Amino acid sequence: MVQEQARTIETPAGLQVTLPPPHATESGRNFSNVIGWEAGRTPKAPAGFTVTKYADGLQNPRWLYVTPNGDVLVAEASTEVGYWKRLGAKLVGITKSMALGNSANRITLFRDTDKDGKPEVREVFLSDLNQPFGMLVLDSSFYVANTDGIWRYPYQTGQTRISSKREKILDLPAGGYNNHWTRNIIANAAGSRLYVAVGSASDHGEHGMDQETRRANILEINPDGTGERVYASGLRNPVGMGWAPGTNTLWTSVNERDDLGDDLVPDYLTRVQEGGFYGWPYAYFGPNEDPEWAGQQPGLVAKALVPDVPLGSHTASLGLAFYDKTSFPERYRNGAFVGQHGSWRRSELVGYKVVFVPFRNGTPSGPPEDFLTGFVADGGGDEVYGRPVGIAVLPDGSLLVADDTSNTIWRVSARP
């Protein structure tokens, strides 16, 4: 049944969110205009932190991965222009905002040999990929999650380029109207199972659920690609994944649906329960029925889990990294950083920042708070300097943030 009044929900983490009724407002559209960073300007971090440029001159740096020996791998990939043509969008002013164009389809390696926060080595690590995103080193193998499958390569610690024969261990569904092309991958602590995040092919299943096979899920497989099963479902577009420090609990950041109003539906950070169903497309943020599916799946609506941390509607909360080092002040330790790319499906810009969620004993202990801001240009309007996405924690405890539309990677360090 559609909720006619606003409803306040308490999450399993003890946080509260108020959900307006569906269509309480129009579902706005506001494409940001990326103007880039002028000389000397950087994002803004809280007092006690310094923000510097780690690397630039990339082509849509979308995701980051730190290898066990400390090398930084950057997946350079983007949404193809054809997606927006299918939507009938006017491409003038959109291409740069949305990081569109010909996807670079490569992974670039950076190495900071003297540990001064500035990499001296920059090499093309792997190329000729198909919209690469998630990366993983496990034992003597390197895995990359392309939009249409998982590939495995022989890997030796310290190598700066891969040219060995590759093996496709898993086919994945690709394409779709909403073009959720990113595929992330992560291993459990024992390295015995891999988890693959696959977003939906639509906004809310409007093209039929037969188009959503193996999508809107986190899949679990063996390291050789066998033994696939759905670990959790009903996740519209799960992107970031991470293990809460000191636990065996998997968490994910989820980009939720549009077309229910400016303030529905909140993106969220949540623990991933084995076998859990998180509502999409029949329900949102727990057992709140999507009016487009009214009365069609009451059993699934009833079992929809309430996520842990609301992150704001249409913020495009994609990046996720747990802070497992010690150089930041104690309050940041074991907490989660979330990269909010910013969405075009709201009348006013939201997101365009990195937020921090404090954790205590493996559970969120407070609401999200701004950490890295300043991406929206002074004076408001639709101008932004860049859009943060992937996040990684370096061995020295500093934080890297990929800013894909300005082709920059930022480094945030704590002052001594």
Image: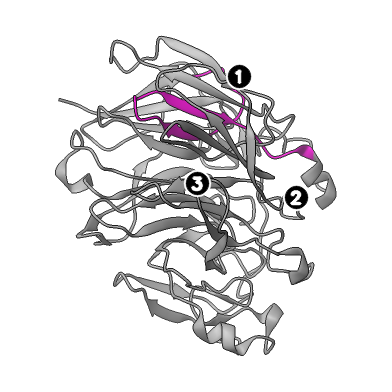
Please state which amino acid type lies under the numbered disc 2.
Gly
Q: Which residues are magenta?
A: 56-81
As drawn, 65 above or below 340: above
Circle 1 — which element?
A: loop
Quadrant placement of the C terminus: top left
Nearer-N-terminus badge (3/1):
1
Instruction: Find out whether the residues at labels 3 and 1 contact each other: C-beta distance under 8 Å.
Output: no
Assess whether residue 367 is covered by the magenta stretch.
Answer: no
| Pointer 1 residue | 163
Q: In the rendering, which numbered label is found on residue 175?
A: 2
Distance from Cα at disc 3 to Cα at disc 2: 25 Å
The figure's colour scheme reads: one colour
Quadrant placement of the N terminus: bottom right
Please tell me whether mark 3 or mark 2 is closer to you in this view. 3
| Pointer 3 residue | 223
Nearer-N-terminus badge (1/2):
1
Please state which amino acid type lies under the numbered disc 1.
Ser
Q: Is residue 248 rendered to the left or right of residue 213?
A: left
Distance from Cα at disc 3 to Cα at disc 1: 21 Å
Q: Is residue 204 rendered to the left or right of residue 395?
A: right
Q: Position of residue 219 (x, y in %)?
A: 55, 58
Circle 3 — which element?
A: loop
Instruction: Find out whether the residues at labels 3 and 2 contact each other: C-beta distance under 8 Å.
Output: no
Residue closer to the observer: 324 or 290: 324
- What residue do we see at 55% from left, 53% from top? 197
Q: Position of residue 50 (x, y in %)?
A: 28, 26
Please state which amino acid type lies under the numbered disc 3.
Pro
Instruction: Find out whether the residues at labels 1 and 2 contact each other: C-beta distance under 8 Å.
Output: no
The answer to whether any part of residue 88 appears in the image is no
Distance from Cα at disc 1 to Cα at disc 2: 27 Å
Nearer-N-terminus badge (3/2):
2
Neighbour class for label 1 at 10 Å: few (<14), some, many (≥20)? few
